[in-house]
Amino acid sequence: MKTTWLRLGAASAAVLLALPLAACGDDGDKGGDTKSGGKTELTVFAAASLTKTFEELEKTYEAAHSDVDVKLSFGGSSDLVAQITEGASADVFASADTANMDKLVAAGLTAGEPQEFATNTLMIAVPPGNPAGIKGLADLTKKDVNLVLCQPEVPCGSASAKVAEAAGLDFKPVSEEQSVTDVLAKVESGEADAGLVYVTDVTAAGDKVQGIEFPEAADIVNHYPIVAVKDAQHADLAQQWIELVLGEGQKVFEQAGFGAPTP
């Protein structure tokens, strides 16, 4: 399968080179082959909760590939799947859950089997000083608490719903965001009294927020899979990124607070 991708990529490149220069500006062109400076562009779509870790891996990858420019695109996993399904050009996709990865697999847009590389759990994030006096999940249901969650279709939103169900609670958020980083931003700014985000997000935020653990989190684990996208323009480079994530990247994820992938 990998050999087929490489041949397809070479054929596509030949066709593109044969087109008039004016065609390079066509919105229908997948593009993304090079940037100014002549570097090959590797496009990686990844869940927002992977921002800091993937940015660190980007430096490692580019240090070993001086002719490659890694283009990272972060967002809610559901939004990223929708973009790829609608034709967005991507070489690699990393999801914050298996449900959204399954959608890409079902659409026939993956090359090979997705591989799990990390796990994560939820934590309550509150502004410094915890002005609303949040002590646990039950406090998130109080009428005077402004709670912010991820949208239900986003992995952190799906996990939040499962947590609420497990605890027998009914959350009534004042807003539902498209990504976990959006939830965290509202907590950091003080717009929200609390938000449900990942442990890794609280760790990455430092003293901008406080984290509150709750026992139900241990039973609701998010599994992070990664895969090369079907017909990726740079299948060989995509596989090398995946190998970095599955190999040397494991130390980066552990330091960021991610759990190990399940056996």
Image (cartoon, rainbow, N blue to C red):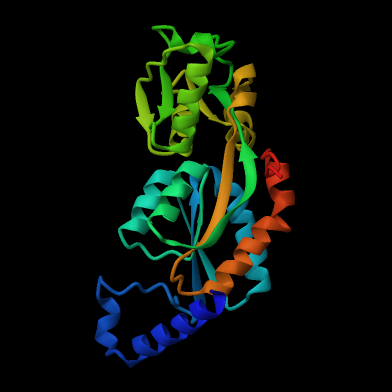
Residue at image point 27% right, 77% down? 25
Q: Residue at x 33, y 92 (%)?
A: 18
Q: Position of residue 190 (x, y in %)?
A: 46, 23
176 sits left or right of 44 in the view: left
The quadrant where residue 161 appears: top left
Tally the marks.
0
Asked if residue 246 can be seen in this view, the reply is yes
Q: Nearer the viewer, residue 96 or 263?
A: 263
Please, is residue 241 above or below residue 216 in the view? below
Q: Residue furthest top?
A: 143
Residue under the image location 50 percent in, 79 percent down: 4
Quarter of the image for the C terminus: give it. Answer: top right
* Residue at left offset 45%, top offset 55%: 105
Asked if residue 22 lies left or right of residue 73, the reply is left
Q: Position of residue 218 (x, y in %)?
A: 64, 25
- In this rendering, the answer to whether 241 lies above or below 11 is above
Horizontal relation, residue 114 to residue 177: left or right: right
Extreme residue toward the bottom, this view: 18
Q: Nearer the viewer, residue 141 or 5?
A: 5
Residue 229 location, x and y as percent? 47, 63
Taking 16 as reference, is 187 left or right? Answer: right
On the question of residue 214 being in view, the answer is no
Q: Is residue 130 above or below residue 73?
A: above
Residue 16 lies, in percent from the top left, at 35, 86
Along the line of sight, which residue is nearer the eye, 178 or 221?
Answer: 221
State the residue in front, 164 or 183: 164
Q: In which image quadrant can residue 19 be found?
A: bottom left
Residue 241 quadrant: bottom right
